[in-house]
Image (cartoon, rainbow, N blue to C red):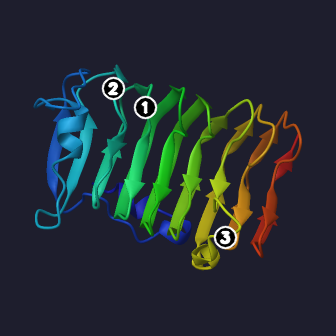
Amino acid sequence: KKLPKCAIGYAGSVTGGARGTMYTVTSSDDNPSRPQGGTFRYGAQLANGRNGGVWITFARSMTIVLRDMVWIRSSTTVDGRGVNVVFTNKCFVLGGVSNVILHNFEISRVPQTDTIHIFGSSRGVWVDHITSSDAKLGLVSVVQGSTDVTISNCYLSNKNFNMLLGASDADSQDRNMRVTIFRNWFRDSMQRMPHCRWGYCHVVNNLYTNWGYYAIGGRANAQILSESNAFI
């Protein structure tokens, strides 16, 4: 549980489920209507406001085909270190939550939505060492008043849209959004790496290869600090 000491940027104070229950995923099955013990979905439901949250690890490498989106609760860590964990088909949703760490797994091949959707004034989310690709609407999205988010050390590749920070010119609540984008590899995408609205986006030490229309974009009074990025 020393992982939070490595958190950086605007999500640098997160602890995830460090004070909560340790839970190990042993099964790749997924039953949204009746989650079974040992499955990821069961573990994701364990965090609540009274138990300090949950720290989820995996007993072995596995591919989990999600049958429905997974709602990630406050004070949750999803820790894929030491194994190769892949989620497919549906997305992670973080709505109105705080203090979340998503670390060292892949979430790809999501045909209907983005892969990680952070919305509803969520605060304190660290997305680190994630591989994500092949989604209809984009990959990581931070929207609707969410703030203090860091996306770091990720491999992000999608044919069209990649990362969206602020979904609408009308969402003026995003003027308080702060996001750190650090040491990611954006590859083979047409646009939005990221696209920022209203808030403050620190985009630093990222690698961009084979982009199309544009790499970094902004509108609706966004403030973007772009530092030491490589465009190849």
Q: Measuring from the top left, give residue 144's x and y in whole percent.
A: 53, 66
The residue under label 1 is which amino acid type? Lys
Q: Point out residue 222 in the picture as x, y percentages from the top left corner.
A: 75, 72
What's the distance in space between the residues labelled 2 and 1, CA to CA?
A: 7 Å
Task: Determine which of the numbered discs, if any, sits on residue 90 in the image.
Answer: 1
| Quadrant of the drawing holding the C terminus | top right
Q: Which residue is mark 3?
A: 170
Q: Secondary structure at mark 1?
A: loop
Asked whether disc 2 touches disc 1, contact meaning CB atoms under 8 Å apart, the reply is yes
- Mark 3 to mark 1: distance in Å? 27 Å
Q: Which residue is mark 2?
A: 67
Residue 172 at x, y percent in the picture: 63, 76
Tell me which numbered mark, 3 or 1, is placed earlier along the sequence.
1
In terms of secondary structure, where does tag 2 sit? loop
The quadrant the N terminus occupies is bottom left
Taking 93 as reference, is 135 above or below it? Answer: above
- At x 11% / y 67%, what residue is drawn? 50
Distance between mark 3 and mark 2 Cα atoms: 33 Å
Instruction: Specify the quadrant of the image occupied by residue 43.
Output: top left
